[in-house]
Amino acid sequence: MLFHVSFFAMGQRVDFRNDSLFINNIFVNWMTSKSTLDSLLHDKGKLKKTTGKYIPGTNQPAKWTKIIYNKKGLIFSKNEYDTSSLLVAIKLYKNMNPEVDRNNMSTKTFNGDLFIDINYMNDKRRIDQLQKLTNCLVSYKESTFASHTGIVICNILYQKREIRALFDFQTNNLTCIFID
């Protein structure tokens, strides 16, 4: 009798705890290479260089390196002026307005488990539920531009780190999490 055991997980686990990011229980930071991320996620990420807003206090545009995992719903970003940080974006739900997805995070949805500290995060979370997160402070402000853009923004403060949560204006579903 032949048994085949697979260690490949269908979904990924992303944990943000104690100011550290873990992918499938492996610590990752700004020094983590693309090949290591590829191995952890069982996928080849697409490397993309972009120019963004200005470097604080200068007139020079900031240069970014992004590693996009379209099939996984994950984007990792590093900027060249502050090399000590790794930003991660997680797509939880497609926005009802496809233009919003094209502008914010044009990937498939994340198929895995996302935790901020001990708090499980998914697209079913509402703003009132986020306000009850353990070890987090949540601020939310009604935005007058939300009906035009199709998004509502909520800020989660966890151990001095700001995490942005975007909600679909029409469905109130949590669409994206950005850990800065």
Image (spheres, rainbow, N blue to C red):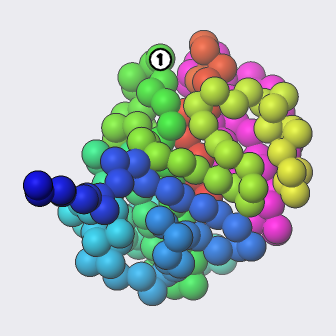
123 versus 97 height, above or below:
below
Residue at 60%, 15% in the rendered image? 171
Magenta residues: mostly which secondary structure?
A: strand
Picture coordinates of residue 174 (x, y %)? 61, 31
At a point 45% along the width and 86% down the height, the residue shown is: 31
Q: Which residues are magenta?
A: 138-167
Give 28 or 152, whichever is nearer the viewer: 28
At 80% from the left and 61% from the top, the residue drawn is 158
Q: Is residue 48 left or right of residue 176?
A: left
| Residue 167 placement (x, y as % from top left) | 63, 29
Res. 53 in view = no
Between 165 and 36, which is closer to the camera in this rendering? 36
In the image, residue 53 sits, relative to residue 145, either above or below, namely below
The stretch drawn in magenta includes residue 156: yes
Q: Position of residue 9 (x, y in %)?
A: 35, 54
Q: What kind of residue is marked 1?
A: Met
Specify the quadrant of the image occupied by residue 67: bottom left
Task: Identify the residue at image location x=74%, y=39%.
Answer: 154
